[in-house]
């Protein structure tokens, strides 16, 4: 009426192991195998019947269904040719006795581990065996309880190890070669990515005009980072070199003195003075550069501004007269230092910025020019102070004819506004009459006006020529090419001693962009050459080798997996009722 019952301690079928002498873990079939006896109703029998000694024993026996299975009594004769369980007795049995300790559970039979004895499979060529469990009471097997068998697969580790060693002998060199090639490819890829990043940074730093020359399809205002990387993908060193050459030619043109011709009487600051004229009338001759440096002055009225148009430059210079050579100081301390040189100076810190009259929403207001006007290098037009030129005969405002370097733009609001103010430059005297009429209607005094082109002379002519009621206007005209001329006073008048020059290319805001373009394009050229150098290496050949090695390594590792006990399918689970 009693049955042998395996508790739920894990599956006990289709187990696999090897007889490895090196790896205890690979020899393990199952650990903690627990059995109990139950009655016919399935109840656990704690008090085993009949008294005496109860035990369960197990051993590895031949698989009767396998080809060439070993025969023999007690589960197979010829036991010497069969693998053995570790810890078994001389007959190959591993024994477990019923527990009498309540803390461990009464009537339970426990095998701590079922492990194949190392090297015990070397005497057979079979791989399929059985593990047979049977119950003994006082040394005899009860008829009511049949043996319980489990099939196992067992590897001969010596042969497996030999195969594994052979495979590993092939595998390790291939892995080393693969790792070396892969590292080299990774280094190239990282180097290429770094060069591409440097190229993107350099290209992104280019002014937009040069970006368009280099990459017409790329729009820096709307394109994303990915679009930038896509655009630079096709860049070559030849194309970038063309941009570098173009930028350098533009720079040479900007720096070439022949392209920045100074007008008669116009000199850069470093050439202002010489020993001969310095001792003469200081009102007409500029100060020595070392004097200006000692004072700390910004320069002179003439040296700090430029005028591109020849006639406008002549007119404004003539209007300013002696003030052209006045030293420009930024504070009272510089002005005080100028006293020992008897220099005439203007302290811009003492001059208030220009204010302009506006009418907005019916209310009149006064304010300085906006930051946008400052960036544009212009005084605002369209207010009451500086009406729209279309209303007053289309003159040009002399203050806006001046070109200043960005670092000196603030002088337009203070120094030059105090000197030039609203001076108007007309192409002909017809515009003067329109302007006069407009200001009379507004009952306002008109500003100074100069006609740039006269019918009787090439020179500058005052707007008041032949008109008596212009008030405070210039009553003479000059000719800078002669010592005197028609319309001058009886004594004659010398030409301009000094006048505004044209802005050299190196002083224009575009020059800063040009320098930036050269720097960034040279950086881009270095990056693209380095990237091409990396790309020209034998990357393709190495990639082919890596792919071939990967396939070979995969095939060898697959062989190793087939030799491993972990590749065997293990059945599974739940309770297993013994035969009875």
Image: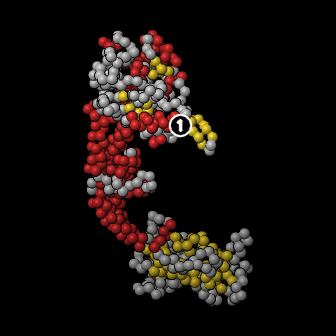
Look at mark 1 in the image and give the residue it sits on.
Answer: 441
Residue under the image location 64 percent in, 78 percent down:
7
Pick the front one: 391 or 151? 391
Q: Is residue 315 above or below residue 194?
A: above
Q: Position of residue 172 (x, y in %)?
A: 35, 60
Q: Is residue 196 above or below residue 104?
A: above
Q: Position of residue 388 (x, y in %)?
A: 48, 41
Disc 1 on helix, strand or loop? helix
In this rendering, position of residue 173 left or right of residue 140: left
Residue under the image location 61 percent in, 85 percent down:
578
Q: Is residue 101 above or below residue 433?
A: below
In this rendering, position of residue 307 left or right of residue 26: left
Residue 229 seen anywhere in this rendered image of the structure: no
Q: Where does the C terminus fall, quadrant-wise? A: bottom right
Where is residue 181, by image quadrant? Answer: bottom left
Circle 1 crowding by C-alpha within 10 Å: few under 14, some 14–19, many from 20: few
Residue under the image location 47 percent in, 78 percent down:
153
Q: Position of residue 198 (x, y in %)?
A: 38, 47
In this rendering, position of residue 190 left or right of residue 374: left
Q: Position of residue 559 (x, y in %)?
A: 38, 71
Q: Is residue 286 above or below residue 539?
A: above
Pick the front one: 559 or 446? 446
Residue under the image location 51 percent in, 77 percent down:
570
Pick the front one: 239 or 395? 395
């Amino acid at each position: 009426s009693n049955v042998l019952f395996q508790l739920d301690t894990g599956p006990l079928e289709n187990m696999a192991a090897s007889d490895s002498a090196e790896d205890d873990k690979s020899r393990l079939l199952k650990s903690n195998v627990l059995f109990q006896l139950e009655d016919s109703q399935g109840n656990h029998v704690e008090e085993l019947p009949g008294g005496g000694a109860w035990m369960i024993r197990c051993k590895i026996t031949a698989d009767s269904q396998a080809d060439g299975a070993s025969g023999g009594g007690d589960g197979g004769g010829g036991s010497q040719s069969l693998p053995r369980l570790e810890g078994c007795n001389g007959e190959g049995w591993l024994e477990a006795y019923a527990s009498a300790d309540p803390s461990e559970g009464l009537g339970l039979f426990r095998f701590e581990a079922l492990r194949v004895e190392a090297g015990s499979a070397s005497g057979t060529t079979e791989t399929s065996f059985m593990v047979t469990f049977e119950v003994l009471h006082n040394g005899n097997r009860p008829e009511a309880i049949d043996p319980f068998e489990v099939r196992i697969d067992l590897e001969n580790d010596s042969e497996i190890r030999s195969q594994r060693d052979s495979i590993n002998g092939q595998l390790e060199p291939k892995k080393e070669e693969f790792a070396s090639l892969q590292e080299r490819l990774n280094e190239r890829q990282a180097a290429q990515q770094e060069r591409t990043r440097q190229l993107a940074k350099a290209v992104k730093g280019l002014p937009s005009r040069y970006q368009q020359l280099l990459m017409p399809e790329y729009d820096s205002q709307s394109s994303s980072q990915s679009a930038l990387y896509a655009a630079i993908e096709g860049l070559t060193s030849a194309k970038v070199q063309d941009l570098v050459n173009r930028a350098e030619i533009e720079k040479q043109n900007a720096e070439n003195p022949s392209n920045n011709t100074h007008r008669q009487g116009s000199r850069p600051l470093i050439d202002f003075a010489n020993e001969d004229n310095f001792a003469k009338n200081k009102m007409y001759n500029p100060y020595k550069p070392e004097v200006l440096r000692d004072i700390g002055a910004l320069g002179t009225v003439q040296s700090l501004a430029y005028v591109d148009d020849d006639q406008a430059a002549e007119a404004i210079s003539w209007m300013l007269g002696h003030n052209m050579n006045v030293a420009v100081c930024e504070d009272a301390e510089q002005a005080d230092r100028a006293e020992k040189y008897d220099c005439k100076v203007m302290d811009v810190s003492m001059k208030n910025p220009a204010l302009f009259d506006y009418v907005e929403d019916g209310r009149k207001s006064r304010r300085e020019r906006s930051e946008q006007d400052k960036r544009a290098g212009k005084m605002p037009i369209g207010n009451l102070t500086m009406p729209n030129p279309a209303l007053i005969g289309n003159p040009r405002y002399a203050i806006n004819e001046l070109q200043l370097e960005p670092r000196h733009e603030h002088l337009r609001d203070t120094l030059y506004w105090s000197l030039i103010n609203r001076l108007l430059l007309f192409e002909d005297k017809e515009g003067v009459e329109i302007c006069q009429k407009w200001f009379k209607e507004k009952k306002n005094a008109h500003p100074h006006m100069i006609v740039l082109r006269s019918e009787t002379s090439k020179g500058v002519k005052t707007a008041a020529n032949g008109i008596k009621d212009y008030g405070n206007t210039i009553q003479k005209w000059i000719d800078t090419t002669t010592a005197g001329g028609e319309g001058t006073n009886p004594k004659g008048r010398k030409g301009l001693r000094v006048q505004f020059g044209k802005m050299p290319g190196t002083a224009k805001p575009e020059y800063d962009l040009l320098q930036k373009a050269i720097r960034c394009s040279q950086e881009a050229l270095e990056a693209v050459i380095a990237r091409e150098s990396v790309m020209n290496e034998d990357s393709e050949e190495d990639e082919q080798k890596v792919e071939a090695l990967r396939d070979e390594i995969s095939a060898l590792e697959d062989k190793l997996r087939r030799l491993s006990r972990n590749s065997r399918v293990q059945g599974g689970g739940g309770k297993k009722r013994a035969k009875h």
